[in-house]
Image (tube, helix red, strand yellow):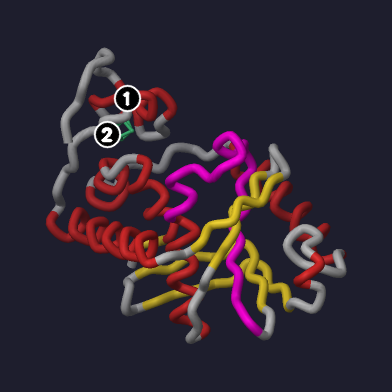
């Protein structure tokens, strides 16, 4: 079973899936983990105290709020723990917290598909259709709404299948074409992509 974080990593670079699930290299130490947990708890406490949900949206005054919701789907072979789920009598709204900056007020692509993967899990676990979700960026204090249309949904499903394929067939994917990602990559020490001088890498 893969995790929702794998979907985020796959969007960043498919090769990370190979390092993690096929080669099982030691996971890079996550120095942000403890800070992230503290910030997560702080956002959750503030959100619990509010009358409304979703950071003051008055339309969600009577919403039910659920935090750290464990979700799993044997059909998708996917699991994850969602930061925050808002439930009204009309809809379920998944929310993922991020402790960095937004993409100039918008969502980062890997976060968009991570949120979509959560939405697919919410749909299956609660037998519902999720129309929208949010990514909350704490540094910018913005909530970016993601409208979950068929295109996004199908792309996320395709990614989940492709991740499974890499693991099952033990395929080493090519380096990402986006060389800037190699500079910040946590798996750089295992990968030639990190060492190659700037220049095009083909998929
Ligand atoms: S260093 Fe670059 S090519 Fe290698 S896993 Fe990281 S992002 Fe992908």
Residue plotted at (32% across, 25% down): 179
* Total numbered badges shown on the rendered structure: 2
Residue 136 x, y percent position in the rendering = 64, 51
Q: Is residue 165 above or below residue 131?
A: above
* Local crowd size for mark 1, using a 10 Å CA cut-off: few (<14), some (14–19), many (≥20): some
Q: Which mark is residue 20?
A: none
**In-front residue for pair 54/197:** 54
Secondary element at tag 2: loop
Instruction: Specify the quadrant of the image occupied by residue 31.
Output: top right
Assess whether mark 2 and mark 1 are in contact (beta carbons under 8 angstroms): yes
Q: Is mark 1 within 8 Å of ligand 1?
A: yes
In magenta segment, residue 122 = no
In this picture, residue 192 sits left or right of residue 52: left
In the picture, the quarter occupied by the N terminus is bottom left
Image location of residue 66, percent across then percent down: 68, 73
Tell me the magenta residue range.
90-113
Q: Position of residue 37 (x, y in %)?
A: 67, 50
Q: What element does badge 1 sit on? A: helix
Judge from the rendering whether residue 147 lies leftward or rightward of residue 144; answer left or right.
Answer: left
Q: Looking at the image, can residue 95 be seen?
A: yes
Q: Quick check: 143 left or right of 5?
A: right
Q: Can you identify the residue that label 1 sits on?
A: 179
Question: Could you give the CA–CA distance between mark 1 and mark 2, rounded to whole angstroms?
Answer: 7 Å
Residue under pointer 2: 176
């Amino acid at each position: 079973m893969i995790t929702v974080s794998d979907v985020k990593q796959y969007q960043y670079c498919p090769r990370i899936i190979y390092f993690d699930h096929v080669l099982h290299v030691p996971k890079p130490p996550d120095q942000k983990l403890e800070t992230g947990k503290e910030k997560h708890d702080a956002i959750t406490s503030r959100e619990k105290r509010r009358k409304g949900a979703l950071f003051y949206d008055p339309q969600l005054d009577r919403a039910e709020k659920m935090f750290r919701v464990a979700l799993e789907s044997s059909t998708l072979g996917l699991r994850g723990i969602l930061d925050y789920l808002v439930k009204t009598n009309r809809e379920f709204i998944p929310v993922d917290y991020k402790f960095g900056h937004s993409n100039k007020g918008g969502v980062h692509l890997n976060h968009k598909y991570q949120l979509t993967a959560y939405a697919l899990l919410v749909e299956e676990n609660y037998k519902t259709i999720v129309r929208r979700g949010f990514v909350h960026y704490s540094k910018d204090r913005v909530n970016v709404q993601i409208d979950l249309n068929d295109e996004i949904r199908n792309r996320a499903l395709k990614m989940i299948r492709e991740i499974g394929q890499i693991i099952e067939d033990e395929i080493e994917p090519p380096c990402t074409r986006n060389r800037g990602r190699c500079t910040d990559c946590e798996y750089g020490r295992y990968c030639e992509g990190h060492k190659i001088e700037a220049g095009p890498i083909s998929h």
